[in-house]
Image (cartoon, rainbow, N blue to C red):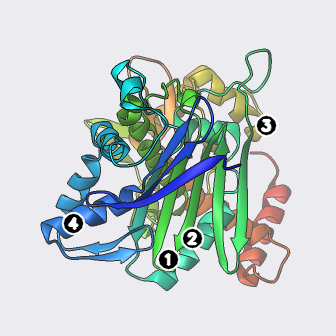
C-alpha cells in the first residue's frame, strides 16, 4: 500500500520544491521549499549576476536587490505557490469538496533562518571559528540561551521551562559544527565549504515563542530566527573582538573627564581594581543587571573586608565613566557593557591563564615575574 505520494517539481519563481500528500484520511500534505532557490531564481529573472554557494549565495553584483528579494518572500507568495500547483497536480479533494469549503490551509511545521557571512580569508576564518567553538562551549546553558532567544528560562519548580539546554560540537570529517538547543529549536553554526561562516536557527515548534502555527505568523517567526542568529554572533563577538589594545588599556590607567564629571584611574595593579573586574564578570549574563548591594556582596569576599555603600557608589561611578558599565534607564541597576566584557576577556582572563598555567605553553619569564610578585605581596602582608 502506498502511504505517501511525492511530487517533485521546478517552479519558475521558487525553483525546485516538493509536495507530499498522504493517501489516507485526513489527507495531510507537506510543502517543502528553499528560500535560497527562490532568491537565485529571482536574481536570474532580473539578470543580476551572482555566484552560487551550496544552499546560499557566495557573491552578488547587487547585494541590496538580493536582500530586498529575501525580505519579500512572504506568506502570501508561499500560499500562492501551493494553490498554483494544487490546480495542476492530483490530490484528494475534488471540485465538489472545494466548493463546500474543504481545502488545504498552510501552517508552519519547520522554519529555518540562516545568515551566511562570506570570508575574505577562508583559512584565517577556519582558525577563528575553531577558536569560537572552544570559547563558547557554555552557550547552551540556560543563562546564555535566554540572552540569545530573549526568553526567560525557569530552571526549577512546577513552572520550570521544558526541554533540553545544551551545546554540542559535532565533527563530520574535518568540518566541526557548533549546536545550541532551546526546547525544540536548534542553532547550528559551521564553516561552510571552507569559505563562509554559516549560522542557522531552525524552529520546529512555533509555540516555543508563543507564536501560532498558521502561515500568516511567518513575519513574527522571521524576527525571532534572525534575531537569534545576530544575538549569537554578538555574544561570540564580545569574547573575540580585539578592541582592547595598548591605547584602550592605557586609557584605563588615567583619570577621565566625561561631561564635566571626573573619574579617577582604574590602575591595573590595584588590588581593588582587580577585584572589581573579577566581580563584574559574575553579572555579565544577568538580563536585569545588578545593584550596588549585589556588587558589594561579591566584592567583599574578594577583598577580605566589608565594603561600605558609599565606597561602592564611588567605584560604580568610576566604572560607569570609564565605560565598563552603564546604568539601566529609570532604575538604580547597572549592566556590564561590551567594552567591560572585552576588558576582562582580552586582558584578565588570557593573562591569568598564561601565568597560572603549568604547561610549557606559558611564557617562563611572565610566569616567573608573576610568582615573584605574589611572594613579595605575602611578605609585605596587608597594608
Q: Quadrant of the C terminus?
A: top right
Question: For mark 2, does the 10 Å Cα neighbourhood hold few (<14), some (14 to 19), or many (20 or more) residues?
Answer: some
Q: Which is more foreground, mark 4 or mark 2?
A: 4
Determine whether the residue tagged by mark 4 lies in a helix, strand or loop.
Answer: helix
Task: Between residue 119 and residue 336, name the one nearer to us.
Answer: 119
Residue that carries the numbered disc 1 in the rendered image? 125
Residues tagged 2 and 1 counted as in contact (Cβ below 8 A): yes
Question: For mark 4, does the 10 Å Cα neighbourhood hold few (<14), some (14 to 19), or many (20 or more) residues?
Answer: some
Disc with the residue nearer the chain's start (3 vs 1): 1
Determine whether the residue tagged by mark 2 lies in a helix, strand or loop.
Answer: helix
Single out the residue that lies furthest toward the left.
46
Determine whether the residue tagged by mark 1 lies in a helix, strand or loop.
Answer: helix
Q: Which is more foreground, mark 2 or mark 3?
A: 2
Disc ID at residue 43: 4
Residues tagged 4 and 2 counted as in contact (Cβ below 8 A): no
Q: Position of residue 132 (x, y in %)?
A: 60, 65
State left or right for residue 368 relative to residue 289.
right
Determine whether the residue tagged by mark 3 lies in a helix, strand or loop.
Answer: loop
Q: CA distance from mark 1 to mark 4?
A: 28 Å
Residue that carries the numbered disc 3 in the rendered image? 304
Disc ID at residue 129: 2
Q: Residue at x 45, y 38 (%)?
A: 224
Amino acid at each position: 500500500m502506498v502511504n505517501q505520494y511525492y511530487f517533485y517539481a521546478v517552479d519558475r519563481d521558487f525553483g525546485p520544491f516538493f509536495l507530499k500528500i498522504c493517501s489516507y484520511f485526513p489527507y495531510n500534505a507537506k510543502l517543502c521549499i528553499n528560500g535560497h532557490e527562490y532568491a537565485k531564481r529571482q536574481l536570474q529573472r532580473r539578470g543580476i549576476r551572482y555566484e552560487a554557494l551550496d544552499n546560499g549565495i557566495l557573491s552578488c553584483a547587487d547585494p541590496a536587490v538580493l536582500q530586498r528579494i529575501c525580505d519579500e518572500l512572504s506568506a502570501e507568495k508561499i500560499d500562492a505557490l501551493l494553490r498554483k500547483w494544487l490546480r495542476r497536480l492530483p490530490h484528494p479533494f475534488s471540485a465538489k469538496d472545494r466548493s463546500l469549503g474543504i481545502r488545504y490551509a498552510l501552517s508552519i511545521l519547520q522554519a529555518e533562518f540562516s545568515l551566511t557571512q562570506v570570508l575574505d580569508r577562508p583559512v584565517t576564518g577556519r582558525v577563528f571559528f575553531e577558536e569560537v567553538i572552544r570559547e563558547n562551549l557554555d552557550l547552551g546553558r540556560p543563562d546564555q540561551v535566554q540572552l540569545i532567544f530573549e526568553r526567560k528560562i525557569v530552571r526549577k519548580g512546577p513552572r520550570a521551562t521544558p526541554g533540553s539546554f545544551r551545546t554540542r560540537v559535532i565533527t563530520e570529517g574535518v568540518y566541526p559544527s557548533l549546536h545550541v538547543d532551546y526546547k525544540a529549536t536548534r542553532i547550528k553554526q559551521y564553516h561552510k565549504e571552507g569559505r563562509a561562516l554559516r549560522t542557522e536557527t531552525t524552529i520546529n515548534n512555533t509555540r516555543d515563542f508563543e507564536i501560532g502555527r498558521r502561515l500568516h505568523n511567518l513575519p513574527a517567526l522571521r524576527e525571532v530566527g534572525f534575531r537569534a542568529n545576530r544575538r549569537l554572533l554578538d555574544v561570540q563577538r564580545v569574547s573575540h573582538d580585539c578592541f582592547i589594545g595598548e591605547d584602550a588599556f592605557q586609557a584605563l590607567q588615567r583619570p577621565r573627564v566625561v561631561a564635566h564629571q571626573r573619574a579617577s584611574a582604574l590602575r591595573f595593579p590595584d588590588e581593588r581594581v582587580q577585584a572589581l573586574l573579577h566581580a563584574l564578570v559574575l553579572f555579565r549574563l544577568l538580563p536585569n543587571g545588578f545593584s550596588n548591594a549585589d556588587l558589594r556582596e561579591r566584592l567583599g569576599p574578594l577583598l577580605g573586608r566589608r565594603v561600605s555603600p558609599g565606597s561602592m557608589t564611588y567605584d560604580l561611578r568610576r566604572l560607569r565613566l570609564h565605560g565598563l558599565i552603564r546604568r539601566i534607564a529609570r532604575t538604580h541597576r547597572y549592566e556590564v557593557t561590551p567594552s567591560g566584557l572585552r576588558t576582562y576577556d582580552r586582558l584578565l582572563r588570557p593573562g591569568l591563564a598564561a601565568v597560572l598555567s603549568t604547561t610549557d605553553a606559558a611564557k617562563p619569564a611572565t610566569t616567573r615575574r608573576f610568582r615573584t610578585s605574589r611572594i613579595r605581596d605575602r611578605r609585605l602582608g596587608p597594608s
